[in-house]
Image (spheres, helix red, strand yellow):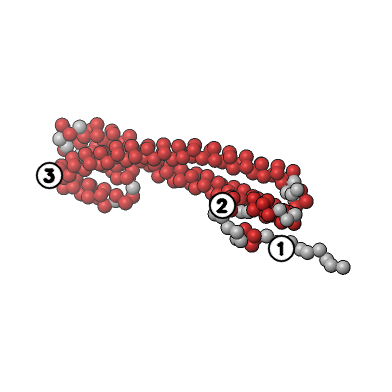
Amino acid sequence: MLKSYGKGRRALESFNGLRAEHTAAMEARPEAVAAKLAASAASKATNTQADEFIDKATNILDDAGDANDAIARDLASARANVASGRAVFVASLVSMLRTHLALLPEDSDAEALAAQGEALVPALRALQPSKAATRTAAKADTAELDVLDGRLLEVISKVNSAGRKAFRRLGNKVMVEAFKYHHIVGKPSETAPEAHDEPVASPPVG
């Protein structure tokens, strides 16, 4: 019926190929979501550890700074540079703990704390690129699906339009209704879909 409107086997094969591409993109989507969740969980864990380290280190150094101007100055300088990022701030605190270790309380475990902070620095440095890459991948997946959705919708719209034209010529109102666009978008309309159809030309007279 629709072959004469350009909707024959070739069009069907093209549509099925597009559907397969869309299905593959949809199936890959959970993997991207899982990667994003895993990255988020890792980020949260690293930041929680960093928060604990910063709280302990700054308290130890604050107390020591009350009796030592050099420690107070170093800590103030590190705090002033906090905008450079958490990795830089943690690295500064690690350096101060080690530099002033002899002046810190023995029972504060400052040496062990410095080792913990040192291990956190590379993890903190890796967080931002990792988060950015995950966001970029998620956006790319969404963009790909949006493009495929649009292409599928365009093909289906054209098939519906061809179907309405064909069955209108035959006077089959039931099938004209069946090919109305609202069956796809879920919003019934008696006139809107018809507005996109080209008028049926009347045969020449005489």
Please give the residue where the numbered disc 3 appears in the rendered image. Answer: 67
Say above or below: 198 vs 163: below
Query: Tag 2: Cα neighbours inside 10 Å, few (<14), some, or many (≥20)?
Result: few
Which SS class for mark 3? Answer: loop
* Sequence-earlier tag: 2 or 1: 2
Position of 185 with respect to 93 (left or right) is right
Task: Say which quarter of the image contains residue 109.
Answer: top left
Position of 178 with respect to 3 (left or right) is left
Position of 153 with respect to 118 (left or right) is right
Is residue 171 among what the camera can see? yes
Front-most of 167 and 105?
167
Which SS class for mark 1? Answer: loop
* Sequence-earlier tag: 3 or 2: 3
Which SS class for mark 2? Answer: helix
- Assess whether mark 1 and mark 2 are in contact (beta carbons under 8 angstroms): no
Image spot of residue 200 (x, y percent): 74, 61
Q: Nearer the viewer, mark 3 or mark 2?
A: 2
The kind of residue tagged 2 is: Val
Q: CA distance from mark 3 to mark 2?
A: 73 Å
Residue 185, disc? 2
Front-most of 194 and 99?
194
